[in-house]
Amino acid sequence: MTTAKRDTYTPETLLSVAVGVFNERGYDGTSMEHLSRAAGISKSSIYHHVSGKEELLRRAVSRALDGLFAILDEEHARVGRPVDRLEHVVRRMVEVLIAELPYVTLLLRVRGNTEAERWALDRRRDFDHRVADLLRAAAEDGDVRGDVEVRLATRLVFGMINSIVEWYRPETRGASGREVADAVVRLVFAGLREE
Amino acid sequence: MTTAKRDTYTPETLLSVAVGVFNERGYDGTSMEHLSRAAGISKSSIYHHVSGKEELLRRAVSRALDGLFAILDEEHARVGRPVDRLEHVVRRMVEVLIAELPYVTLLLRVRGNTEAERWALDRRRDFDHRVADLLRAAAEDGDVRGDVEVRLATRLVFGMINSIVEWYRPETRGASGREVADAVVRLVFAGLREE
């Protein structure tokens, strides 16, 4: 069995196992021994694929970050009024978060104790700033309310979106990714109260 | 110094030290030894005040929970249209979270590995249900939008509010508790978009 497993192991499946272990034990609390046991292959087999757990972290959070940054290149994020571009970005952030749930979960839990973690936090901060810029542009157009400070509004909207990783479970029947994205867009842009 | 400290120690100051250690190391990762070192008093002095770390956890999360449940007894949470009562509860939740920041932070990080933690999670769930009931009543009145499912809306609103513990720091100049509460109420009830 072990041999069969080893033969079919790809960097992709190893990454998926590693992300699960990182999310469960925390990145700091995960050793190569834990990864080896979870993957069912020897440590030296892991080193055949990657240089160590730092590389696995970089690959895993890159998958989340690349998905998020790709949103900003989509046509609806580039063309049109800032408020509509912002709405597109918020919707797609929820969709990417749900499509890449374990990877985004890991990204959001990174604490900055090692160089790879600090690199991830920096890229995450870059993304946050890009979204804040869009909100600022929409406020300057008078398309979003002026009585909530841009940085505070950005934090609260990110807070709502990021909290989805705490409860969304694809395997249980419940709201689909699309339904959650619709709900977030409605709440963030139009609010709860029926006028 | 140690003697002076021991003499002035009260259950209140011990609780405040313990909450700091729990939030930093995690409740599971905290031993009586850690608490003794952080408080600068011996373990037996701690046992003079409390039966152990479970009691400290219960007292700490009770302070957060009592603050939250007290909101529901306030006049504006009991009298009036459900949508207005809900708005009052949301505003006060943010204010209590900020006033009792370390205690609410601990409550939100509890994972349910011990009996005391499961008891805290149960009480937290009761509170969530009380707020969801208010949202449901407001939806039945037609005062909140009907196109976002009540449970999903509750989770997203709680997600936004609870995320405040991740970035709010009373010691740095920035938004006051009142400003954050205003921002949350505006976003949750009226949304970002200027009509």
Image (cartoon, coloured by chain):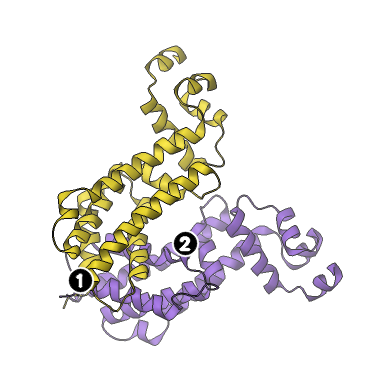
Chain colours: A yellow, B purple
Q: Is residue B66 visible?
A: yes
Q: Nearer the viewer, residue A48 or B49?
A: A48
Q: Nearer the viewer, residue A191 or A57?
A: A57
Few, some or many residues within 10 Å of mark 2 (<14, 14–19, 20+): few
Mark 2 or mark 1: whose residue is earlier in sequence: 2
Res A6 → quadrant: top left
Q: Which residue is mark 2?
A: B166
Q: Position of residue A172 (x, y in %)?
A: 30, 44
Amino acid residing under circle 2: Glu
Question: Left or right: B146 with respect to B13?
Answer: left
Question: Left or right: B17 with respect to A8?
Answer: right
* Residue A98 badge: none
Q: Nearer the viewer, residue A77 or B50?
A: A77
Amino acid residing under circle 1: Arg
Q: Position of residue B187 (x, y in %)?
A: 29, 72
Q: Which residue is mark 1?
A: B193
Q: Position of residue B10 (x, y in %)?
A: 73, 74
Q: Nearer the viewer, residue B141 or A27?
A: A27
- Do marks 2 and 1 both belong to one polypeptide chain? yes
